[in-house]
Image: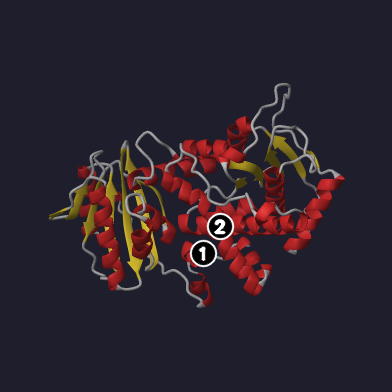
Amino acid sequence: MRWLPIAAAIAFAALLPGGCRESESDPFETRPLTPELQQMLEEIGELRGLAPPPALEAGTVSRFDITALLDRQLTDSDREWFATTTTLYRLLGHLGPEEDYLSVLRAFGEGAIIGLYSPVENRLWVVQREPEIDLDAMSPVERSALAHELVHAIQDYHFSLDELSEHTAANLDWGLAATSVVEGDAVTHQGLWEGRQVVLPGGTRLFLSGGPAVFSTPPSIERELRFPYTTGAEWVNIVRSREGTAAIDRYLAGEPLSTSHILHPELRDAGWSPETVELPDLAAALGGGWKRESGGTLGEFHLRNYLELRLTALPAVTAAAGWRGDRYDVYVNGTDSVAFFRVRFAHETGAAEFTAAQAELLTVAGATPADSPSGVVAELRDGRTTIQLASPNSSEVLFVIGSSREVAERAAAALANA
């Protein structure tokens, strides 16, 4: 998940302060921390058990300038990641044919980001109307965002968040799990600092407590973007309470982790790790003009999130819970695209349960799954076609999703003959 290098605090759009700076020439100006902010940084570092960075700058940004600030942080590799993930997400159904992931992220940021830390620039910003950071004048939400971003600055100083992002970029599962550690750790220690400073009436924490969706964001993408701040924070609290922050530090330093570990803490206690699953290189079998664009591991969360496109949460959670490993590869040829998936489950029953859930997903989406020589074919109204293939391993599921039926059938034949 490429959200990791742009470590951000998110909350309700309704709680964001509005306004813009009419006379400011540089909307992204930052300054060295004032003595008051330096003290806050040191307090948070003490809570986190890590020394604060020796030099840090902070500033404020208008909500209307967030998109431009986000764009400034993106590298060429970031933009390539968003482009290839868009291809995959269009095939899966998270994005429509005219939508792209980066534009969705920009829209989400405009409505949900309340703070941002840049590992590339080693600077942080809080979204607020006033150009100066004044702790006494800040709202509880602004103070919360500032504390959150200061945790990110401490993490980055010790573990290099941009290097962690690059290390996990090719693996959607590990990338999202790593982001869950980064954001869960920040949510946890921001909350601990707040507890020492101020408690809102009734002990309420406004940082991320559900709230209305950002309506321009597809629900499945919003689930993905919020996962690190909710489930990730719950996982960090569990691990921290049992083993202290040293266990969290190992994952920030690059120890592999999956979303299954985040969803099921008992798997980590048992020493479990995902199984390696492979697919053959199918570019030549697909024919002239085809090339592999991306590939990696989806992981349990992404598998569940795919099913939740049309199913309610409980059936999707149950059908994905037996995940033990997977591999996907995406190939493109002009405007045509196809994705191959091989998913391994703990047992035959889990594979059968996922297959049934996927068939229901496609039926609800408007397809009529039917047997064919290539497998069970389900063609949607927009032409996207899923083919469930027979697998020689009863605990595995094989399927392809093509941008058209012709492409899907070509892909199914290529995989069957590999």
> In the rendering, at what x and y percent does residue 223 appear?
46, 50
Residue 219, quarter of the rendered image: top left
> Which residue reaches farthest bottom?
270
Pointer 2: residues within 10 angstroms few (<14), some, or many (20+)? many
Mark 1 highlights which residue?
262
Comes first in the chain, label 1 or label 2: 2
Q: Quadrant of the C terminus?
A: bottom left
Question: Answer yes or no: do the residues labelled 1 and 2 have beta carbons within 8 Å?
Answer: yes
Q: Is residue 285 visible?
A: no
What colour scheme was applied to this rendering of the protein? secondary structure
Horizontal arrangement in the rendering, residue 168 relative to residue 141 (left or right):
left
> Which residue reaches farthest top?
23
Mark 2 highlights which residue?
180
**Residue drawn at point x = 47 percent, y = 42 percent:** 82
Q: Is residue 240 visible?
A: yes
Mark 2, secondary structure of its residue: helix
> In the rendering, at what x and y percent does residue 19 appear?
66, 28
Query: Which residue occupies the foreground of this view, 76 or 13?
Result: 13
Query: Which residue occupies the foreground of this view, 36 or 392?
Result: 36
Q: Amino acid at mark 2?
A: Ser
Q: Considering only vertical position in the picture, is 338 above or below 127?
A: below
Pointer 1: residues within 10 angstroms few (<14), some, or many (20+)? many
Mark 1, secondary structure of its residue: helix
Query: Which residue occupies the foreground of this view, 56 or 361?
Result: 361
**Residue drawn at point x = 26 percent, y = 66 percent:** 352
**Residue drawn at point x = 73 percent, y = 25 percent:** 24
Looking at the rendered structure, the number of numbered marks drawn on it comes to 2
How many angstroms separate mark 1 from mark 2 (CA)?
8 Å
